[in-house]
Image (cartoon, grey):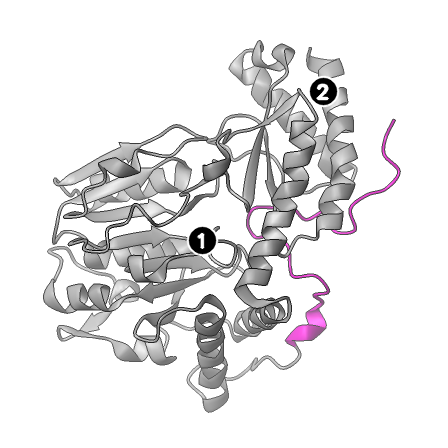
Amino acid sequence: MKPNARPARPDFSSGPCAKRPGWTPEVLGDAAVGRSHRSKIGKKKIVEAVDRTRSLLGIPADYRIAIVPASDTGAVEMALWSLLGARPVDMLTWESFGEGWVTDVAKQLKLKDARVLKAPYGQIADLDAVDWTHDVVFTWNGTTSGVKVPNGDWIADDREGLAICDATSAVFAMDLPWAKLDVVTWSWQKVMGGEGAHGMLVLSPRAIQRLESYSPPWPLPKIFRLTAGGKFSEAIFKGDTINTPSLLCVEDAIDGLKWGESVGGLKGLMKRSGDNLGVLEKFVAERKWIAFLAPDEAIRSNTSVCLTIAAPWFTALAADRQAAAAKKMADLLESEKAAYDVGAYRDAPPGLRIWCGATVETTDLEALLPWLDWAYTEIEREFS
């Protein structure tokens, strides 16, 4: 039997993610549209977004924060192309986006002193094997694999290299140890449910020192340049963005940050995400047909929660049939308006991926659960 109730907001996409509860287009009424981003009002809005970000996340005063183009991808690429090459580099990868950074370093930058530490989906690489005389590039949370690093204890306080962290599906939902991180990137479209195309780049004093003491041997496009005449471009981190941002999106980001402050700041946001994960953990524990892609609770993501179908009939299927069955399940949920965009990422094992970040309401997740059982029964009837 189909369930009677549906989630009020069936938006469980892992990016762009659900808008904050209560959001409507009217909250953008104060946006500085039609104005230059270099005008007083435009720059004021940009600085406000940066300042609220620093306050909400507790980013140290001597770290620099900038709004950059091309989402999290642009922010990571800026860091890789501007900072790498001075030392050997350890590339940590356990999902598709981390694998993409490996490809950039190995095939585009062609660094010879690059070492790859890799783990399959649902696991993380051996963190004890990291060499902190090297630069280290890693994702804090594997958006497509449902795993996260358990903490920052493995990052050396006396590291010689830089810790470069893609935190796009972790920031605002997990406690990042800023003193152990030299470069942190994310996009507005993830945990806070902002709009796409804008990235955030945070640099520690050590990263800034690297920029001023090392010039990479390859040419840098304009949107990647963080120095001018060998000096750090401080203005980029004080409201003078590299390119033109959308002031409508800036206003939306400010709205999200204000909402984050209203629900208890970072601790409140983390609790909301943790409570959401708890709903799915209870559901999975009570059923044999479904399992987490990350079985180890210590490294299980509380934002991009990845699930697999564990029933014997499903695991006995050929790979293409597994993919078809999992896709059919996601399609059924969408057609019934019970859950949108919950299919596993295309490179990940077949299954579901349900966003549990703070902008998702726990009551909506609870309303989704009966639909998961229903959709599973439908695909079992068709594919088993």
Secondary structure mostly seen in the magenta stretch: loop
Q: Can residue 368 be seen in this view?
A: yes
Does the magenta-highlighted stretch encompass residue 16? yes
* Mark in the foreground, 2 or 1: 1
At mark 2, the secondary structure is: helix
Sequence order check, earlier mark of 2 and 1: 1
User: What amino acid type should be assigned to the residue bearing mark 2?
Assistant: Ile
Q: Looking at the image, which is closer to me, 141 or 351?
A: 141
Q: Marks 2 and 1, Cα distance to the nearest angstrom?
A: 33 Å
Residue in the image at 33% along x and 54% along y:
76
Q: Are marks 2 and 1 in contact (CB under 8 Å)?
A: no
Q: Can residue 338 be seen in this view?
A: no
Count of number-bearing discs: 2
Mark 1 crowdedness (10 Å alpha carbons): few <14, some 14-19, many ≥20: many
Measured along the vertical axis of the image, is residue 286 above or below residue 30?
A: above
At mark 1, the secondary structure is: loop
Residue 236, quarter of the rendered image: bottom left
Residue in the image at 71% along x and 49% along y:
362
Mark 2 crowdedness (10 Å alpha carbons): few <14, some 14-19, many ≥20: some
Residue 70 x/y as whole percent = 41, 59
Does the magenta-highlighted stretch encompass residue 26? yes
Residue 282 x/y as whole percent = 67, 35
Residue annotated with mark 1: 168
Measured along the vertical axis of the image, is residue 305 above or below residue 84?
A: above
Q: Looking at the image, which is closer to me, 280 or 212?
A: 280
Q: What stretch is highlighted in magenta?
A: 1-28
On screen, residue 201 versus residue 225, left or right, reads right
Task: Identify the residue at the far bottom of this view.
Answer: 40
Residue annotated with mark 2: 379
